[in-house]
Image: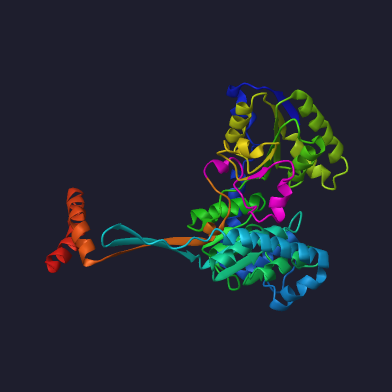
Amino acid sequence: MKIYDNPARASWPALLQRPAKDLTSLRASVGEIMQSVKEGGDEKLREFTARYDKVDLTGLAVDAATIAAAGAQLTEELRHAIQTAKSNIERFHLSQQTKVAEIETMPGVNCWRETRGIDKVGLYVPGGTAPLFSTVLMLAVPAHIAGCEEVVLCSPPNRETGEIHPAVLYAAGLCGVTKVFRIGGAQAIAAMAYGTESVPAVYKLFGPGNAYVTVAKQLAQLDGLAIDMPAGPSEVLVGADAGAKVEWIAADLLAQAEHGADSQVVLVVAGMEQAQAVKAEVERQLADLPRKKMAGASIANSLIVVLAEAQDQLDCINAYAPEHLILSMADARSFAAGIRNAGSVFLGYYTPESVGDYASGTNHTLPTYGYARNYSGVSLDSFVTKITFQELTKDGLRQLGPAVEVMAEAEELRGHARAVTLRLKDLT
């Protein structure tokens, strides 16, 4: 990790730039996969699974019996941990439900808004470097609360067994997923975007993935399908005061770095001595990390920024707009009051980012690559549409109608005005 000592503000944009990853070169090859699945359906899905995952599938769908039996392959400890996480995620997302509030904007004019679950949603759960069963919880729990009628899940099969990891299947069964398919990569996104003989087409896609999945979601969006948010490599920024333990800071940085070689971690501190101590501790802890090769590549693209003034630290963090922000500070809440751009914030010495990844209750599907400036993380709102309603009484139309007539005439939309005028005429 390179240390930057009180860099000038003019250098921040270049300094805080994420590692560039040009995905344009993938668009042609991913586009071909998408089109092939669109035209060839299940046959192409089997072909691509054999080619990329080295698995010859007879059936794409995972049957109910296999899902029901998945829990028996897990330890009781893991089942309990998944259940605890589900309970917390459920409780937090249930709190996001809103009551219908009917507002009388003027006498006889009543307006309100109601939510409806999106009928069909598709969840992509990666399985390449690790079985991300936590992603199932983060996506399927709010989908179930929202009332989505069909929840389709795709995840790549294991090369040795030809099956999806039992923890992913157990979580899917626990959270009410309606259909599960052994499909990964861009072909899974294509299947859910366009539909095949086996896989139903959905209205909105959710979930992280590699560069191929990211490009596939972008192309599906161009075809009119909604997606959760733009995606990039995972990242964390740690803002630490002098009281933060060096070992804990290093562990937090490496926890994110082990996600992938293209992940980025950033540390913002007030003093050079602390920066150097953390850098040394990161190298020490990295040595015995099982995924040290991947984490090491991430650390090579990461940095420590030394800024003596608290306001500079705050401005630097907002400029970076991190996916995950850990404020390892004694008075983290006060500092956090100035945070405007972040996906999810972890306050104080005892709140590692790992708790949000798994089980605190907040959602870990968050905007990356600076998109926290204009996107929110996945929530219950992500799985619903909100429909407005209005109802006028006779008196309401008498009161409001004339204003509408005047405005419509001024915009030279005579038909709009007439729809009101005829009603007012009959009322008199």
Q: Residue furthest right?
A: 288
Q: Residue 243 sits in which quadrant?
A: top right
Q: Main secondary structure of the magenta part?
A: loop
Q: Residue 253 sits in which quadrant?
A: top right
For the N terminus, the image quarter is: top right
Left or right of residue 182: residue 277: right
Task: Locate residue 359, reporting x and y percent.
Answer: 71, 56
Identity of the residue drawn at 77% across and 71% down:
71
Is residue 35 depicted above or below 200 in this figure?
Answer: above
Q: Nearer the viewer, residue 254 or 155?
A: 254
Task: Locate residue 206, reporting x and y percent.
Answer: 59, 58
Q: Nearer the viewer, residue 47 or 121?
A: 121
The chosen color scheme is rainbow
Range covered by the magenta-colored residues: 345-374
Is residue 333 depicted above or below 401 in this figure?
Answer: above
Identity of the residue drawn at 55% across and 39% down:
340
Task: Locate residue 355, reporting x and y percent.
Answer: 72, 51
For the C terminus, the image quarter is: bottom left
**Residue 350 part of the magenta segment:** yes
Q: Nearer the viewer, residue 110 or 263?
A: 110
How many marks the image carries: the answer is: 0
Identity of the residue drawn at 18% across and 61% down:
398
**Residue 97 part of the magenta segment:** no
Report whether residue 136 is seen. no
Left or right of residue 125: residue 416: left
Q: Nearer the viewer, residue 265 or 267?
A: 267
Task: Locate residue 349, reporting x and y percent.
Answer: 74, 41
